[in-house]
Image: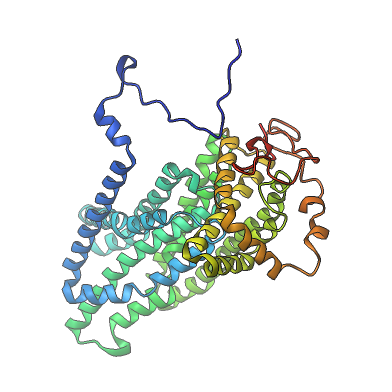
Amino acid sequence: MAISRPHPTRPGRPPGPAGPAGGPAPRRAQRWRRPWVRHGALTALLALSGLVILGLVREQTGTEGFLVGLGLAVLPVPPLVAAFRWLDRVAPGPWRNLVFSFAWGAGAAALMAIVANSFATRWIAAETADPSRADTLGATVIAPVVEESVKAAAVLLVFLFRRRDFTTVLDGVVIAGVTATGFAFTENILYLGTAFGTDQLTGGSGVSSVTAATFFVRVVMSPFAHPLFTVLTGIGFGAAALATGRRRPVRFLLPLGGLLLAMGVHALWNVSSALGEYGFFAVYAAFMVPSFGLLTWLVVWTRQRELRAVREELPAYVGAGWLTPAQPYALGSMRARRVARRYARGHGGRTAARAVTQYGAYATSLACLRHRGRLGRAGADFAAREHELLRELWRRRDTARPALEHAARVTAPPVPLRAVYGAYGLPAGVYEGYGAYGRHGAYGVVDPGRSAHPVHPASGPDPYASPYRP
């Protein structure tokens, strides 16, 4: 008996969950499956935790100290968020992921950390009858473990529940960095507000005040400290996202290794404050600055690698009619993308510019997906995901194509694109399919004689004309 294969471009609604004895699931369970219910519960939880942590901080610093700390702590937030957003420009993720990450770090993570740190410090002080030792152990052992764990929870949640938005190392870096930025924001309010209260009691003012010293150390010298620690966890999750097809223990150990490394670096940073003035500057100069420079180089190199993947992988879709010959070049250059967005904004307004940005994001995701397939790391849903991304590109083609072709003409090298890419704008050999099952394997190949024009202009190219035709 022949079994028909469902059409991948026409996904039907999945059947409802079965209840006992094959009957429908209880209505209460079905309600929790609705997205707006989950989103509403999560929003309420984050809002409640934010209000509680702000109340605790205001109680410790006083109203005046809280306002001063809030005004000073907000200063490094926009540059840090802008830096992580810049890293994410190649394939920008949804804003809701960044909002969730920042809210988790500033609210839920900060609340859990302050409660756990206080409880652990009091317990150690009661067991050892030595408050000074309890404070030292709390800062160097308890705080790094607790704080990095609660910040890593945000990365884990996005990794589990927003898996399609979490496919590269840069995704882990951005989510982890924004989470840590939110955590540092709340922590800086507490430290700066407490320092202001100390100055009010001692009469300190000017450059010699405790507030000025705290601001210099936490906001001027080391605004990147918490993001630096947690980014190591994000790199571990990003590596796990790229390790599709490998054994499960390996994918589990990568995030765990990143988390342990983040805890270790955090502990070293906290220890430096107990080594005196020169010890702190020695650790800062010998370890923190080089680590920051190395991580900066790593994430920028990863960003350039994604752009290179766009230039190398997308030409295969030109022959099937999904892209024009100039598009892989334009999408593989951030300068060309900026020119395309300006062109679209000038001719179609913000909506057109947003469509071009989304087009670039989907194209980058498609290139990374094909790259993983060529390396044999494609998941079981490869074909469905590829068709979904291609449909998203086709929906925005009328707006994005003129802008990208204009950008290619403006930024192109003096050598004609046809001379660079060859027939149909394609490099030699790109027609060959690679796939997770080897060359000419399950994903098939693109026929070199196929027309460069869409098969069905009204509805888009044939979905089975992609380089990975199943």
Q: Position of residue 210 (x, y in %)?
A: 29, 81
Residue visible at 72% across and 38% down in the picture: 434
Q: Considering depth in this image, is 456 or 371 the residue closer to the camera?
A: 456
Residue visible at 27% across and 74% down in the picture: 69
Q: Residue furthest top?
A: 1
Relative to 316, does residue 134 appear above or below in the rendering?
A: below
Residue 210 appears in view: yes
Q: Quadrant of the N terminus?
A: top right
Q: Position of residue 423 (x, y in %)?
A: 82, 51
Is residue 209 rendered to the left or right of residue 62?
right
Display colour scheme: rainbow
Q: Residue furthest bottom?
A: 206
Q: Position of residue 311 (x, y in %)?
A: 69, 56
Relative to 188, does residue 9 appear above or below in the rendering?
A: above
Is residue 391 rendered to the left or right of residue 351?
right
Residue 246 appears in view: no
Residue visible at 20% across and 58% down in the picture: 52
Q: Position of residue 148 (x, y in %)?
A: 39, 54
Residue visible at 53% across and 35% down in the picture: 248
Snapshot quadrant of residue 398 = bottom right
Snapshot quadrant of residue 134 = bottom left
Q: Considering depth in this image, is 76 or 368 the residue closer to the camera?
A: 368
